Structures are given as C-alpha cells and as structure tokens.
Amino acid sequence: GESVGLHLPTLSVQEGDNSIINCAYSNSASDYFIWYKQESGKGPQFIIDIRSNMDKRQGQRVTVLLNKTVKHLSLQIAATQPGDSAVYFCAENEYGGSQGNLIFGKGTKLSVKP
Amino acid sequence: DSGVTQTPKHLITATGQRVTLRCSPRSGDLSVYWYQQSLDQGLQFLIQYYNGEERAKGNILERFSAQQFPDLHSELNLSSLELGDSALYFCASSVGRLPNEKLFFGSGTQLSVL
C-alpha cells in the first residue's frame, strides 16, 4: 500500500486567508519530500521540496514544514488566492537516499472562495 | 510550461487495441518517468528510464512496455487495452537518476478505452 497519505482530502478557504495542507508519511527512512500542485487539465507542477536535514523551507508565499518525530509534512500557503485552487500532492522518496522512487499521496483539493 | 512534451493529448480507442504514448523530456534531462493517474489510485509510478536504460520499475502491467531512445525521448506502449486502463498518463523528467530530486511533468495523455 501507499506510505504517503493526507489528513484532509478537501480544504476550502477564504481568499486572503492562510492555507495549511497536511501529509503523513510512514517510512522513517524517507529523506526527501516534495509538494506538487495540479490544476485541472494540467500536469503536476513543482512547488517546493525539503530534505530531511531541514525542518522548514520557505518559498514565495509557501512554506514546507517537516516533523520527522511524528512523520508529518505540511504545506502552508500565505494569503491564499483564487489561482491557488488546485489539488496538492505530497511525495516522498520511498526508501531514502538513492533507493526506490518518488511515491505520491492521493492529494488534497484546495478551493479558494472569493 | 515545464518543458516536457507529451503527445497525443487525448486518445480514444477500443478494448483489445494497442496505443503508443510519446514523451520528450526537458532539454538536458536524462531521466524519463511514466506515471498513471486515475481517480481511485492517484499518481502511480510505472517505470523510469535513465539515459536509455531502465532504472526502476513500479506497478507496470506486463501488457505495458516502455523504452527510451538515443535522443532521450520515450514511448509508452499499452497493448490488449482494457476498460480499466482508461486514465491520465503522465511523463516526467529529471536531470539525474535518483529519487531525491524534483521531477518536471508534462501535461499528460488522457486515454479513454471504450
């Protein structure tokens, strides 16, 4: 079965609010994590990644937090905009290091209300 | 635009038929990945090629095969098609061959088997 899962399959937020999308992983050996955004009719688009030697990484309006103790990953989107509406996937390298492949969770749908 | 090109965008065919999906990776990328996306299974890794050689295999059926050519483009062949093969098929590429780097996805081929 999949080792990556999501707590919330759907998330609805008001425009301008912050969004938090969560992801749990089960393989403690995983050392690379990545978030993708998929808009309707398009392929997954890279947002941000993080390696296990970090707890936090920031991009433009996005922050990824990694809690290795509880094997939890989150994506925070600041000042959410209608263009952020999409399905968000987390992924991990399943065995860590050079082994295995990127395994994707089932995704969380983010809907932004104007 | 990710730089990864997939053709065709849509494909409608009948059960028992064979189809070929084509992918051109980003310039400079040596790895090509194939993923299948269906509503109930999410993004499933099928196979990866690196510089012309198979590097990793996922949940790819025996009816499916792929190859990567000297110019680094790749083809995914699906034969003896069944209704359940209807899905979005994505190609992705990356510079290296390891699972700890970001992938760039194409826009996908929507396959409908009738």
Image (cartoon, coloured by chain):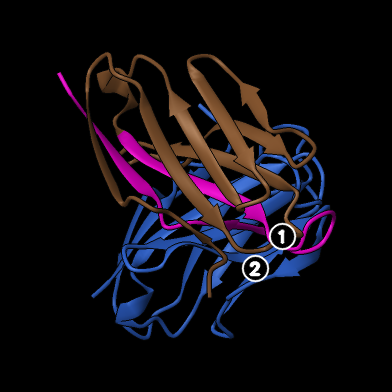
Chain colours: A brown, B blue
- Closer-to-camera residue (A26/B82): A26
Query: Where does the image place residue B82, in percent across and percent down from the top left?
Result: 35, 83
Quarter of the view holding residue A53: top right
B7 versus A106 height, above or below = above
- Closer-to-camera residue (A107/A23): A23
Q: Amino acid at mark 1?
A: Ser
- Chain letter for mark 2, please: B
Query: Where does the image place residue A89, in percent across and percent down from the top left?
Result: 46, 46
* Observer able to see residue A38: yes
Q: Amino acid at mark 2?
A: Ala
User: Can you identify the residue that label 2 sits on?
Assistant: B66
Residues in magenta?
A: A86-114
Quarter of the view holding residue A35: top right
Q: How many marks?
A: 2
Classify residue B92 as left or right of residue A13: right
Image quarter (top left, top right, bottom left or bottom right) of the C terminus of chain B: bottom left
Query: Where does the image place residue B49, in percent across and percent down from the top left?
Result: 75, 59
User: Can you identify the residue that label 1 sits on?
Assistant: A28
**Do marks 1 and 2 share a chain?**
no
